[in-house]
Image (tube, rainbow, N blue to C red):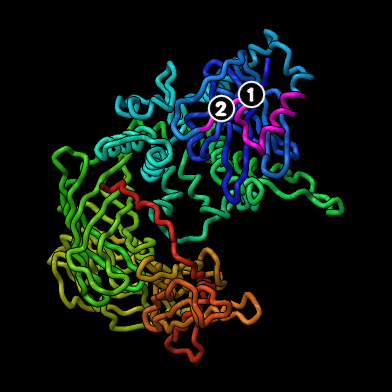
Amino acid sequence: MLPLLLYVTRYVNRTVLYCARFPMGGIGILRLPFWSWSQQDAFHNFTWSRDRFKSFAVAVEAPPYKVNCFCWTHRRVQLAVLLRSKTSTIEKLPSKGREMACLGKRARRYFAPIAFILLFFSSLTKLAVPASPQEAASNSSAATSSASKDAKEPGFPVTDPLVVSKCGACHQPDTKGNLSRISWIRTTPEGWEEAIKRMVRLHGLALEPSDARKILRYLSDDHGLAPDEAKPVAYIAENRMIDEKLPNEEIVHACNACHALGKPLSWRRSADDWKLLANMHIAFFPAIENTSFQRPPRRPDAPPLPPGTDTRPPVEQALSYFAKNAPLQSAEWSEWHASMRTPKLNGRWLVYGTQPGKGRFFGEMSVEAGAAGEAFSTKTKLTYVSDGSVLVESGKGIVYTGYAWRGRENAEQTGSAPDAPKTIREVMMLSRDQSQLEGRWFWGAYQEFGMDVSMRRASESPTVLGVDLYSLKAGSTNSVVRIYGDHLAQDVTPNDLDLGSGVTVKKILSKSPGLVIVNVDVAKGATPGKRDVAVKSAVAPGAFAVYDRVDYVKVTPQTPLAHLGSDVHAKGYCQFEAIAYNNGPDAKSGTADDIELGPVPAQWKLEEFVATYGDDDVEYVGTMNAETGLFTPALDGPNPKRKHSRNNYGDVWAVATVKVAGTDEPLTGKSYLIVSVPQYIRWDQPEVAR
């Protein structure tokens, strides 16, 4: 009996996987592009072993094959794996563009000597001995290893005929109605869309747009996330720029060098499927094994690790973390999937929120269900309280999994300013009682512009949405406050208005069903903190803050990323805000009881973040609007005025200076800004709202 040779070869920055698929056994060498191996190879998946050579352990799909030995080689050939087959019949694969060469006939010049050496040694070992009944049973067990592993953890059967017909050719069904991989995965609409597009690009899946939308809808509804699972990672779908809270340094090393931790946590997988995800990373990005998944060996003279230190490789620690914190089966999903209702959103909705650089806005959206009941038509009008400008837009929205709103609206009038919205994407979560929506609307080449949005279903009862001011200082008098709402009582008196302890409504200046303007005084000894606003029985909790002093200023976002650009590649801007804070009851800055007082006017500038000798990034990365805090990146491309004609990338401080009334010393805040090159390869924008 002769072995079959599988090996991996590395070119520059890619790995090309070589193997052969023989339905009836055989010997040969097959040349495969690395991006098409997953559905054609003789094996289903591979994992690294723990020894220092990191050899492949191959789980073979077809019973005739068995892993016999591992061999680590150098130079071009990194790894060789010998498999046993029952016959020596050689069958050429019909797949176009693949080479098959019989050993000793058409073997490539670089690999033939290694192949024959391996064959020679195999003939001197147990490899040439016919398989025993125990080995045959082991072969059959290896062939179904992935299926048996997944069988230990029940999957979610795929019941949609369209999904089965389009996906079942590669994702094999079992007797319980499960499809391999698909039944052991749950994720967001964006996650399923990403998976479908990868199947189209890399594996030749042919789909009509209408079928793709139906498949996306089914997978999101029946293999999605529960609201409690999706909310902690909503910032991924909302394209927010935040600093994540990371569990430990090893997971940072394994995952965060390339993407946010929220990316994998947006998926729920079986323990075995998490391992397959790591395998996919190694296949697509082979350098990751050395750069992220493993730690270099400790020096012999290194001090001993503390007792109880987890010495497993970072990738194994990460897989354990994900298997525990993002499992396939969960009580949240079981409960939500059983109780999920069809969204009924027709009618008028009240909209309110904030946009960095422009402040608070109030308005309304009308929602109308489509003929098929799958999409909603929307019409929105917003008014900014800072300057009275109006934004009118219209579009469509879809609700996945009973709560995940994905919308897209077009502004009727678009300005020429960089932050002027044109096409606005909407990502929101619907409350369980279908009375409220919260999330982010965003636009821009890198989704860098956006607004935090809350929506409330309009009713016949009075509703208070909020006020125009973020905060009032203790001891202030005759302050004008605008109270926004809906169906506000027209017979309201100052006694019907309650703005919290220490705040007295002196006079009502004007009133209408949607707006009441009042004049208020704040007592000198008023306790700092948030205040509710009540108009008779209608209440807006935490509508504004009362403070006695501004203790510090924080610049947001804290660690943003901007992108250079040109006529070919769009620029990625950054809108900064200076947020004032009061230290709160403990009189300490940066603690949980600090009181946010809202954005305040500031003077803006860039300062050098000194990282190297003679650092000059501040001169080239771009310009900061001193009044508005909008950063505009410079042009992309080699700059002959810069040393070595480098590009205009760099890192700088974005500095805000705030003058506080009643004090001579201004307050300053900083944000660390990285200005990078453009995203030269533009991936598709999510189409879950279409």
With respect to residue 348, does 25 lie above or below? above
Query: What range of the chain is rendered magenta?
Result: 99-121
**Disc 1 to disc 2, how far (Cα)?**
8 Å
With respect to residue 249, does 61 lie above or below? above
Image position, residue 376 (x, y; %)? 19, 46
Question: SS at mark 2?
Answer: loop
- Closer-to-camera residue (323/286): 286
Image position, residue 612 (x, y; %)? 64, 76
The verdict on residue 113 being magenta is yes
Image position, residue 405 (x, y; %)? 30, 47
**Residue that appears at 68% across and 14% down:** 1
Task: Give the residue number, with chain letter if any, for mark 2.
Answer: 20
Local packing at callout 1 (Cα closer than 10 Å; few below 14, some 14-19, many 20+) is: many
- Left or right for 358, reference 373: right
**Residue 642: quadrant of the picture:** bottom right
Question: SS at mark 1?
Answer: strand
- Closer-to-camera residue (550/98): 98
Decide if residue 225 is in sight here. Answer: no
**Residue that appears at 45% across and 75% down:** 580
Q: Which mark is residue 292?
A: none
- Closer-to-camera residue (195/103): 103
- Left or right for 581, reference 248: left
Image position, residue 46 (x, y; %)? 60, 32
Local packing at callout 2 (Cα closer than 10 Å; few below 14, some 14-19, many 20+) is: many
Q: Amino acid at mark 2?
A: Ala
Q: Residue furthest top?
A: 133
Task: Give the residue number, with chain letter if any, for mark 1.
Answer: 4
**Residue 425: quadrant of the picture:** bottom left
